[in-house]
Image: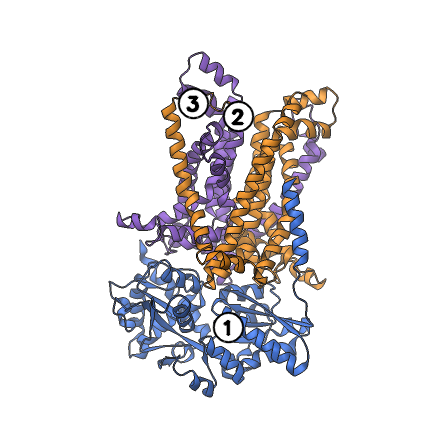
Chain colours: A orange, B purple, C blue
Amino acid sequence: MAELHVFGEKRWMRVVLIGVAVLLLVVMLVAPLVLLFAEAFARGIAAYGASLMKSETLSAIGLTLKIAAIVVPINAAFGVVAAWGIAKFQFPGKSLLVSLIDLPISISPVVAGLVFVLIFGARGWLGPTLSEHGIKVIFAAPGMILATLFVTVAFVARQLIPLMEQQGREEEEAAIVLGASGFQTFWRVTLPNIRWGLVYGILLCNARAMGEFGAVAVVSGQIRGMTMTMPLQILALYQDYDSVGAFAVASLLALLAVVTLAVRRFLEWRYREELGYVGSL
Amino acid sequence: MSIAVAAAPRRRNALPGFGPTIGLTVFVVCVLILIPVAGLFVKATDLSVAQALALLSSPRVLAAFRLSFGLALLAAAVDGIAGLLIAWVLVRYDFPLRRYFDAIIDLPFALPTAVAGIALTALYADNGWFGAPLARLGINVAFTPLGIFVALLFIGLPYAVRTVQPVLADLERDVEEAALTLGAHPRQIFSRVIFPQLLPAILTGIGLAFARGVGEYGSVIFIAGNMPGISEILPLLIVIRLQQYDYAGAALIAATMLVGSLVILLALNLFAGRWVRRHG
Amino acid sequence: MSVSRILLAALVLSAVVPAARADKTLLNASYDATRELYADYNQVFATEWKKQTGETITISNAHAGSGDQARAVIDGLDADVATLALAYDIDAISAQAKLLPPDWVKRLPNNSAPYTSTIVFLVRNGNPKNIHDWADLVRPDVKVITPNPKTSGAARWAYLAAWGQVLQSGGTPAQARDYVTKLYKNVPVLDSGGRGATTTFVQRHQGDVLLSWENEALLAARQLGPDQFSMVVPSSSILAEPSVAVLDKNTAKHGTAKEAEAYLRFLYTPEGQDIVAKHYFRPRDTNVAAHYADTFAKIKLFTIDDVFGGWTKANTEHFADGAGFDQIYQPVH
């Protein structure tokens, strides 16, 4: 990193700030993570590996990845579209719309599941009609995807809106005036500026999609080897007194977070020049 | 959509795409969020007004509201301060293992909430790494409201850090540099130049941490103790209602919770918006 | 980008791991404490079914809290059979979703409960608090761990056991209420489920005694270290009858009525009863019971019908909104 501290604070101040931040992170985040891996490897690496290779666990991993593969791209596209409309324009009801996008985050996961049961359940508003046509939503993959979409819908948008608001729209306006089309402007001016926010948002969305528990639990029906996602499987294993198995799967999700963030680091390093190039446009 | 465009910007905005993007956004918000949530409110109306009032004013429900909202706000505020500090340190300074500390911020997202709950309970129980020394000092964390606070702090931290971090990283440094050359004190630079630009993001982070925390179930349920009137959170009351096949009661508590969260979020957004207009 | 590549790999991977397809499949909606039992039983039954009919059958199990599962079935979980912790939960399926007739309990022997269990105490090694019977649980120095009866089937049985034993030893309902109130004042943590409470007691070292299913206590003592816990059997307790039933409407839809019936009937055979007993549920079959006599302590058991007049009545009086259990926590402030 070049020239990180322009700000004129004293050296001791820096050390104190770093110290406090690191202490906070260690106590709040590192300790649970260490505990997680300590428990996962409590009976050695062989037990760790074996517990991950169980067919039920593998199918839970598969289902989780499938759900994320559907949910994350949809939410990323929605996030970009929503952020453009909201951040680049002034219109009445803007705060309300932003708050509505936030809404799923403030809905208890349990309630998010309940909402879909009310709609698609056997006694719900649409459930009976759909089941007559042989369409299963709840207690099957579609319901779990819907619940995950609902829970994560705000993630990308919420990441991009403050960023794009803060950047204003002068650059884009200049591009338009110079004759660029809307898509060109977005692609070559806006996107490079919001890349970080977008990547953060996608990562957060992905992690949350894979880690969602409460909402998915309500609509999953918890059929072993079929409608179990990784988080559900973790709890199931834990309650089977298989704490190594449970923490092994949990460590995968934690590892996923660490690895995707390492990938982000790499991208950041790689397209610094790209950023400079675009910046000189 | 044409109505939306007609009602749009008074000041001419040269950028294209307002109609389609807002149209699509409103559509998704309606289908995926508004309609399901409206269903919740419709379900709640299965109860008569008298039944609803009796349920909401019962001491246990009131105690749970106080507990869930109070602790979520408190934890979000503390997260806001801690998040600003951590984001600042991560963006501005270089120190050993910085990128690793940066990576770990997202842990509470990646970790299934139930696992977070299990891990935190294991840490803070009387026989845990942190719980044991604290217990010797006479402080019990797990199975008390303090345990709920710890879990909410954990859940909310990434929201607080990750909303501030990109904005902080994108801040134009020239104003700071100019102020510094002109002899301004770092504290003045922070409070006059940097903080005003960060505040909307900080508030957003606090809002998200609060919103997430108030309904949090998975990570809290293990560490809470769940004693009626003392450490019983609102989502648990909803689950209890569901167990009794009382969907309307569950929907009512859920809907009331939502209105409360929404009012607080709206206030934060309005405040942030006004702040941007005044300082931005 | 890398994320999409990971996701692509995910899709490929998930396509590689398909669910095994068989001629017929059954879904058993069960509760938490039967995970080990049915994991074992399903395999034995599938083998037996193949032998008898030549047909391949796959049985999936769904486990959660008993009430949770009842609700899932009511809301459309496509289970062929329900094997739940309380008859009340299957009554609810019958009443709310009409998947089976209200008199379902008469359709299989022994009140449709092929195995029973009871509520016992699990204490720490050496029984440091000297806990021997119900009276010890209300001592001021004893902390009791039991889940929330509002959300847990095991906890409902425990609550009723505590209440019923007062009546059994000649106490009045007022004394029973007094006893149960004192008991719950000694409970520092109310977990939402039975397994959660066991974890709180065993791994978090909360409390001095755990009120537990007998099968859970025996399983926990074995799985989590026999040198750490011992089981204490009270002088009397409740006869817990976990119920099983075919969900007629669902099996009709799937064409699995015959298989579902056979699946539950097999539980009553000596072979089925043996598996049941191996997993610490009390078998109904007297021969099998004699064989496992060492496992199950002699204990004076009373039934919910005798003492409480059945589940519906017990539920209204004790677990409904504002009823017995809620009243314990009323005058908090």
Residue under numbered circle 2: B276
Circle 3 — which element?
helix
C262 horizontally vs C140: left or right: right
Q: Residue at x 46, y 15 (%)?
A: B179
Q: Label 2 to label 1, Cα distance in Å?
A: 61 Å
Q: Nearer the viewer, mark 1 or mark 3?
A: 1
Query: Which of the numbered marks, if any, corresponds to residue B191?
Result: 3
For label 2, the SS is helix
- Amino acid type, label 3: Ser
CA gap, disc 1 and disc 3: 64 Å
Residue type, mark 2 in image: Val
Q: Which of the two residues, B241 or A146, is positioned nearer the viewer here?
A: A146
Distance from the alpha carbon under mark 2 to that under mark 3: 15 Å
Furthest residue to the top? B182
Q: Chain of mark 3?
A: B
- Is B227 on the left-hand or right-hand side of B206? left
Disc 1: host chain:
C
Q: Residue B92's spot in the image, x, y percent? A: 47, 27
Q: Position of residue C312 (x, y in %)?
A: 46, 73
Q: Which residue is mark 1?
A: C37
Quarter of the figure with the N terminus of chain C: top right
Q: Quadrant of residue C129?
A: bottom left
Residue C47 in sight in this render: yes
User: Is the residue under label 1 in contact with that under label 2 (CB below 8 Å)?
Assistant: no
Hey, what amino acid is under mark 1? Leu
Residue at position x 48%, y 66% from top?
C32
- To which chain does the residue with label 2 belong? B
Q: Secondary structure at mark 1?
A: helix
Instruction: Give the x, y percent position of residue C23.
Output: 69, 72
